Every structure is written in structure tokens, then in C-alpha cells.
């Protein structure tokens, strides 16, 4: 049986389920883009709504934290290293981004891994090299590995400005909102490779919320959606793993150990969700000297209004991208107002590109 035939069979099985109005949420930026590219929303029954959640690391970073990053980029003898997506994310002032700061003379460099930033620190000992760490449990262990290597090498000119975040506290914050009306989660496959099935068991055990860990091919996403909708139709709540080729029940203990040995959880701000207790990873203990926020005394300011940008509502399932009044008019990928239109994993960028 071909992949197309299996996908058609899954769609038929989904349509056969006895479902009323049902809202499910994907919590992975890669899922968001894959779902839009494959047109999966348009294939689902009309009573089933698939919403985007806080699964894009760039998108959940609040504007006041971006402002702090922009301020740091202007420090003398600082080389700010970052993944490419972050360079175009505006702060609280439209048009002000790391890309603009670089054009004005700031030493901002794109890297593909934190180890690239570490090599720059070795090559330029007279400069302070700051790696802008962003992501969830997927990328956090790699950033921890760079910090561990920097300590082993005795590098005193390397630090991490950590915007790394943990998925579980965000899901708890979503479900604590009295207006949250979602019946199940399509759990992020990439994060699950690190935290495993066990990392999502709190959903059914504490909240009675179904969850399915899904892969990223269209057929894999449809399978995960079917399993999730089947649970909902049968009034079940459990964690199912539809991505067994990559996700083990226990995840990756070595990666988690590496992360926990050098980072701890601290309170962190999230776009659309506000301040969430113990939701952000920061260097700790003997590795605290590698915390750029501590070394450069960086403090994010008060939350900043977003002048019409509804990115925070989009990534908390309150609003489809196309219903933002700026979408496709004032805010486009060429001239983005908010990060949901900037990131390659952003819900607005996906909706704009594929008209999903």
C-alpha cells in the first residue's frame, strides 16, 4: 500500500469517527509548517479545528527580551552569535532587529550550532562571544554541551544568553486559562525525542487531556491526528506514541543529564502567556559564569504592547493567523510586524506561504 493510499484510509477513518465540535492543538513549529504545506486542515471534517500552539521558539520570545538582545548587540567588543531566524525578529519598535543593528555596525554573526560560537570565542580571545540560545528541550542539550566544553577549555570569553524554554510549563499555563477550550494535544516529536513519552504523561494523569506524539511526514501527522481524535471520540485520555522510530518511552537520558548538570529552570516570559514560573533554562552552579544575563547585567523590561500584532493570540489558539488584522496587509514575510511571520516555524509565515 502506498503512502497516498494509507493517507486516504486515515482520512476516511477520521471522517467516520463520531465527533462533535472538536479543537486540537499542535505544539511544534515543524508540525505547524508541515500541516500547512500538506493542506491537512482543509482535509479534516468541518467540525474538527486544528490550532497552532506555542511550539515556535522564536514566536514565544516576548518583545521585551528581544529589546534586551538588541541592547546587548551594541556592547563594545561583543560578538553576538545567533541562529538565522532571530536576526529578523523585531523588538518592541518595528523595524528594529539584529539585522538592522548589524547593518549599523554591530558584530552579529549567524551560526548553525552553539559549537560554532564556541569556535569563534577560541579564535577571537579579545572579544566577548555571546551565543543567543533559543529553543526548547530539543536544542537545550546542545547549548548545555557548548557550556560544558567552554568550561573544560577554560574559555572566559564565551557566554550564553539563554532564551531556552521548557514545554511542560507552557502547556500547564495554557490549560490553566479558563477560556482554554482544546480537547487534545498533538505533542511535539522533536521535544519527545529528549523527554520521551514520560515527559507528557502529566497531560492525561493530571488534566485528563489526551495526547499523541507525532512524526512530521503528512501520513505520520494524519495518523497522530486520527489517534488523538479516536481518543476524544471514545472519551479516553492517554499518551500514545505515533513516532516510535525516533521517540522512546524514556527519551534521551544522556541529553537530559547533560542539560540538568549545567542548567536549571527559572521564571521566564512567554509571548501570549506572560511570566511562567520555572519555565526557562539558565546556566547554574559552577556554570553560572557562562550566563550572559549575569555577566552583562541584562534585564528584560516590562511587557510591551504590540501595536496590533496578535501573534500571542495565534500561538495560544485564540485566533487563526488570517484573522489578525495585520496579516497579509501590514505584516508580510518581507516586512514582518511580529515573529509569527518571521520564523520558518511561525504560524503566520506558514499560513501566508501556503494560504492555510
Image (spheres, grey):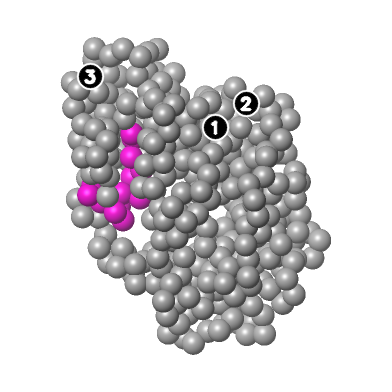
Corner quadrant of residue 82: bottom right
Residue 313, numbered label: 1
Q: Which is more foreground, mark 1 or mark 3?
A: 1
Quadrant (top left/top right/bottom left/bottom right) for the N terminus: top left
Q: Nearer the viewer, residue 130 or 298?
A: 298
Q: Which residue is mark 3?
A: 233
Q: Secondary structure at mark 2?
A: loop
Corner quadrant of residue 204: top left
Measured along the vertical axis of the image, is residue 147 above or below residue 199?
below
Corner quadrant of residue 217: top left
Q: Secondary structure at mark 1?
A: helix
| Residue located at (22% from left, 49% from top) | 198
Range of residues picked out in magenta: 185-198
Q: Which residue is mark 2?
A: 324
x and y percent of residue 5 in the render?
Answer: 27, 23
Q: Nearer the viewer, residue 256 or 279?
A: 279
- Alpha-carbon distance for marks 3 and 2? 31 Å
Disc 1 to disc 3: CB gap under 8 Å: no
Measured along the vertical axis of the image, is residue 245 above or below residue 128?
above
| Residue located at (53% from left, 25% from top) | 320
Sequence-wise, the earlier of marks 1 and 3 is 3
The answer to whether 286 appears left or right of 123 in the picture is left
Res. 278 visible in picture: yes
Q: Nearer the viewer, residue 248 or 310?
A: 310
**Residue 188 in magenta stretch:** yes
Residue 151, numbered label: none
**Residue 341 in magenta stretch:** no
The answer to whether 209 appears left or right of 67 in the picture is left
Amino acid at each position: 500500500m502506498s503512502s497516498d493510499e494509507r493517507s486516504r484510509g486515515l482520512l476516511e477513518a477520521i471522517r467516520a469517527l463520531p465527533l462533535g465540535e472538536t479543537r486540537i492543538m499542535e505544539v511544534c513549529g515543524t508540525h505547524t509548517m508541515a500541516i500547512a504545506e500538506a493542506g491537512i486542515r482543509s482535509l479534516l471534517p468541518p467540525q474538527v479545528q486544528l490550532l497552532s500552539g506555542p511550539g515556535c521558539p522564536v514566536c514565544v520570545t516576548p518583545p521585551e527580551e528581544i529589546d534586551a538582545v538588541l541592547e546587548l548587540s551594541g556592547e563594545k567588543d561583543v560578538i553576538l552569535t545567533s541562529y538565522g531566524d532571530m536576526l529578523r525578529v523585531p523588538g518592541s519598535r518595528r523595524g528594529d532587529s539584529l539585522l538592522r543593528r548589524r547593518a549599523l555596525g554591530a558584530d552579529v554573526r549567524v551560526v548553525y550550532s552553539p559549537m560554532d560560537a564556541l569556535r569563534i570565542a577560541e579564535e577571537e580571545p579579545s572579544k566577548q562571544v555571546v551565543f543567543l540560545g533559543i529553543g526548547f528541550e530539543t536544542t537545550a542539550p546542545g547549548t548545555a554541551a557548548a557550556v560544558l566544553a567552554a568550561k573544560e577549555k577554560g574559555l572566559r570569553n564565551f557566554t550564553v544568553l539563554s532564551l531556552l524554554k521548557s514545554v511542560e510549563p507552557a502547556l500547564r499555563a495554557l490549560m490553566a486559562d479558563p477560556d482554554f477550550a482544546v480537547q487534545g494535544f498533538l505533542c511535539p516529536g522533536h521535544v519527545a525525542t529528549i523527554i520521551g513519552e514520560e515527559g507528557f504523561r502529566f497531560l492525561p494523569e493530571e488534566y485528563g487531556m489526551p495526547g499523541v506524539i507525532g512524526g512530521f511526514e503528512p501520513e505520520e501527522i494524519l495518523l497522530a491526528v486520527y489517534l488523538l481524535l479516536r481518543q476524544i471520540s471514545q472519551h479516553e485520555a492517554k499518551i500514545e506514541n505515533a513516532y516510535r522510530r525516533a521517540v522512546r518511552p524514556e527519551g534521551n537520558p544522556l541529553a537530559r543529564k547533560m542539560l540538568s548538570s549545567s542548567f536549571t529552570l527559572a521564571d521566564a516570559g512567554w509571548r501570549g502567556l506572560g511570566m511562567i514560573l520555572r519555565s526557562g533554562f539558565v546556566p547554574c552552579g559552577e556554570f553560572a559564569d557562562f550566563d550572559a544575563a549575569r555577566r552583562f547585567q541584562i534585564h528584560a523590561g516590562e511587557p510591551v504592547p504590540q501595536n496590533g500584532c496578535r501573534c500571542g493570540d495565534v500561538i495560544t489558539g485564540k485566533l487563526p493567523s488570517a484573522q489578525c488584522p495585520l496579516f497579509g496587509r501590514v505584516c508580510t514575510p518581507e516586512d514582518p510586524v511580529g515573529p509569527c511571520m518571521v520564523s520558518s516555524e511561525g504560524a503566520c509565515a506558514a499560513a501566508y506561504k501556503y494560504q492555510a
